[in-house]
Image: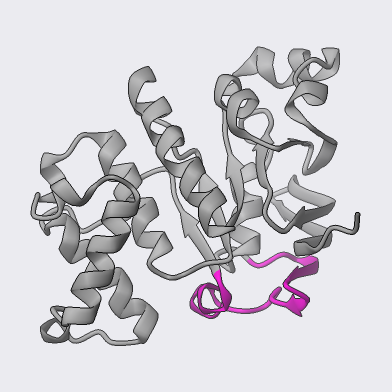
Amino acid sequence: MTRTAILTAEHIHLEFGGVKAANDANLALYQGELAAIIGPNGSGKSTFLNICTGYVPAQSGCVSFQGQDITRLKPRRITRLGVARSFQLPQLFSEQTVVENLLVALASRHGFWNLKSLYQRAWLTEAHELLDMFGLDRYAQTIISDLPEGIRKLIDIAASMALRPSLLLMDEPTSGVSSQEKFLIMDTLVPVLRQQGITALIVEHDMELVEKYMDRVLVWNAGQVAADGTPADILTREDVIKNVVGVM
C-alpha cells in the first residue's frame, strides 16, 4: 500500500552557536497518521516544529507540504496552506470569552481584523460547532482566565482547528496539567483528529500518552531522527529507554 507524504523535510540544518538543533535531518510524515517526536531536552524537537511552520528559518535543506516547497515562507502563508500550530502555552486572549477567541481565529482565516465584524451569524455558528466538537460549548461565554489549564489547552487547539488545517503540529499539548486532565485532553483530541482526517505531529515527553495514542514515534537526538517506528517497537528499545525515557 502506497502512503502519501503530507510533510517532508530533507537535509535540514540549523545550529545556534555551534549547537546543532537540526543536523542533516530527514523526515516524512504521512497522511492521516498521529506521530510523536520524543527525545532529550534541548535536542531540537520544538525547533524542528518552528522550522516547519516558518518561525525559524533553516540554514539549509527543504521542507515541503503537500508537494509545495514552504522552506522560506512566512508563518501566515504556511498557515493558510493548511498547517496549524499550537504551543506549550495556550495562545489565547485571557480576558475575552471562549467564543470570542474562536471568532478571532475564524476572522484570521478569512483575513478580517475589524473586531466589529466578529459577530457574524455564520461565524458564531461555526464557533459553536467547533466548541461542540471538543465538548466545550458549555464554556462558550466563560472568560479564558477563569478556566483550568487543561480546558484552555483544548480551546487553543480548537482555535487552531478554526483554520481548517490538514496538518496540526503541537508542542507538548498536555504539559503543565494534572494526570486526569492529560487523559481528558487526549481522549477528546484524538477522536476529533481521526474523524476530521487531520495528520498530527506532536512533541511529547509523556511516554504513557505516546504509547496509548500515537501511531508512530520519531526519536529526535543530536539534531536528527535517530529511530522511527511504532510505539511498541520504539519504546521497548534499550537505547531509547536509556537515552530518552531515562532523562525525562
Residue found at the far right of this picture:
1
Residue 178, can we see it?
Answer: no
Residue 79 or residue 214, whichever sits in front: 214
Q: Is residue 144 part of the magenta span, yes or no?
A: no
Residue 72 within the magenta-colored segment of the rendering? yes
What x and y, as percent, mark residue 203? 59, 40
Q: In the visual, does 201 lie left or right of 100?
A: right
Residue at x 69%, y 76% (from the top left corner) = 70
Residue 163 in the image: state x and y as whole percent.
Answer: 43, 70
Q: Would you say 88 lies left or right of 29 here? A: left
Seen in the image, is 118 located left or right of residue 21?
left
129 or 145, nearer to the observer: 129
Q: Is residue 114 above or below residue 150?
A: below
- Residue 48 image position (x, y, % from top left): 66, 52
Image location of residue 248, percent across then percent down: 59, 19
> At 42% across and 31% down in the image, what residue appears?
175
Q: Residue at x 20, y 51 (%)?
A: 137
Looking at the image, residue 28 lies above or below residue 37: below
Up-down: is 200 above or below 239?
Answer: below
> What residue lies at 54% left-to-right and 80% top-to-bottom?
77
Give the position of the N terminus as an image quadrant: bottom right
Q: Quadrant of residue 161?
A: bottom left
Is residue 169 depicted above or below 101 in this figure? above
Quarter holding residue 169: bottom right
Residue 212 visible somewhere in the drawing:
yes
Q: Which residues are magenta?
A: 57-82
